[in-house]
Image (tube, helix red, strand yellow):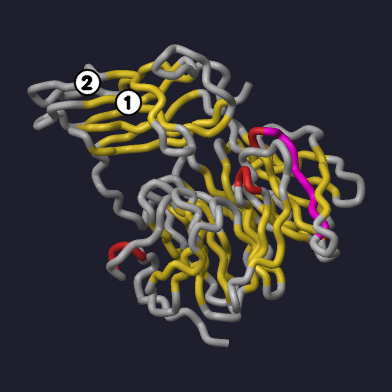
Amino acid sequence: MKRIQLISLMVFFTTILFGQNLLNQPESVVYDSLHCRYLVSNWGDGNIIQIDSTGTQNIWLEDVQGYSGLHIREDILYVACREFGVKGFNLTTGEMVLQVDIPGATNINDITSDNSGNLYVSYPTGDVIYKINIATEQCWLFTDSELDVPNGLYYDEPNNRLLVVSYRANSPIQGISLTDSIATVVTYPGLHNLDGITQDDNGNFYVSSWLNNRVYKFDNAFANPPEIFSNHGDDPADIYFDKINNVLAVPLFFTHQIEFVDAGTGIDQSSIIEKPVKSLIHNYPNPFNPTTEIRFRISDFSEITSAAIEIFNLKGQKIKTLSTSLCHPEPVEGRGEMSVTWFGTNDNDQPVSSGIYFSKLIINGKTRASNKMLLLK
């Protein structure tokens, strides 16, 4: 089997090294060992991007609503397509071989499969998980019990269960039995806004946290507290452990990059040099209903002519401008963290619907920092 030839650095950025960057808010990544390439879903445009063994990017599938989770089973790539349900594509030909609509669902997110020919997909804003029989293309509700914003999924074969992490404060790691659909808490790790979960060849589990911009490593039995495996400068999304090359692939949503972390070393706080932070933005609580406090930091106000907090929906439409008075003619020392409250309304002061929104810190007409928010009603 041909291996991806990773350069000697522990981490590389596909954007920097290989010129043209086709990644547009990368959400999920998998390794296609049949063709020695990574495949990445673009939340921003629905394209599936391939990254070959030289690091070169190409559009593999265009305009296929490939927004969210990716999962390879045999020679088929299965894709969670948000409001468009689930699709399957032949890895060699790119032909669509499966299309399952899920009526009423607007944010199908992650996807995995068992060994009996079934797919499982999470619907965070609906607090449910669906089950799809691949052969018959039938879809039904698998469980809605004890779930709260279920996001990342992983099939834990030895225990015949799904492992679930959720995009909320103090998310537990839950196990859902495939026999009776009953959910139990595996562990409360004290982590927040979890996105992806994956496993290496030694049985260790990895979980990504948007709030902390980190990936955490757990032992096989979740018996010990997690350790920090890697730090990232942006929100790590649906991570994937590539067992062929022994690396963890980490999509960075807002900086349009994939980081590859060598599993033998990882990146802990003592071994990474962080770049100076020019601006940050996050919100609390997240998820929220109906209000949330958007907190932001600007370390240097010099040369700022305009600034605002803007809210966008999933379609990229601006629906709300929260502040236009952040401009300061002189640098401000010790300014610290500032905040503004969003009441879940648009510019016409009408309540917006449940779903995912993005807050952006706009300085001099350019986005300096972004954050994903989840409104639940």
At 70% from the left edge and 57% from the top edge, which residue is drawn? 99
Q: Which mark is residue 309?
A: 1
- State the image coordinates of residue 374 (x, y, percent, origin top left): 54, 31
Quadrant (top left, top right, bottom left, bottom right) of the N terminus = bottom right
Q: Is residue 116 left or right of residue 277?
A: right
Quadrant (top left, top right, bottom left, bottom right) of the C terminus = top right
- State the image coordinates of residue 161 (x, y, percent, origin top left): 81, 53
Question: Overall secondary structure of the magenta stretch?
Answer: strand
> Label 2 is placed on what type of residue?
Leu
- Position above or below: 52 against 226: below
- Position above or below: 100 against 310: below
Mark 2 touching mark 1, by CB under 8 A? yes
Query: Which residues lie in the magenta part?
Result: 126-133
Distance of mark 2 from mark 1, alpha carbons?
Answer: 9 Å
Which residue occupies the extreme bottom position in the image?
A: 1
- Position above or below: 59 against 112: below
Q: Residue 120 magenta-drawn?
A: no
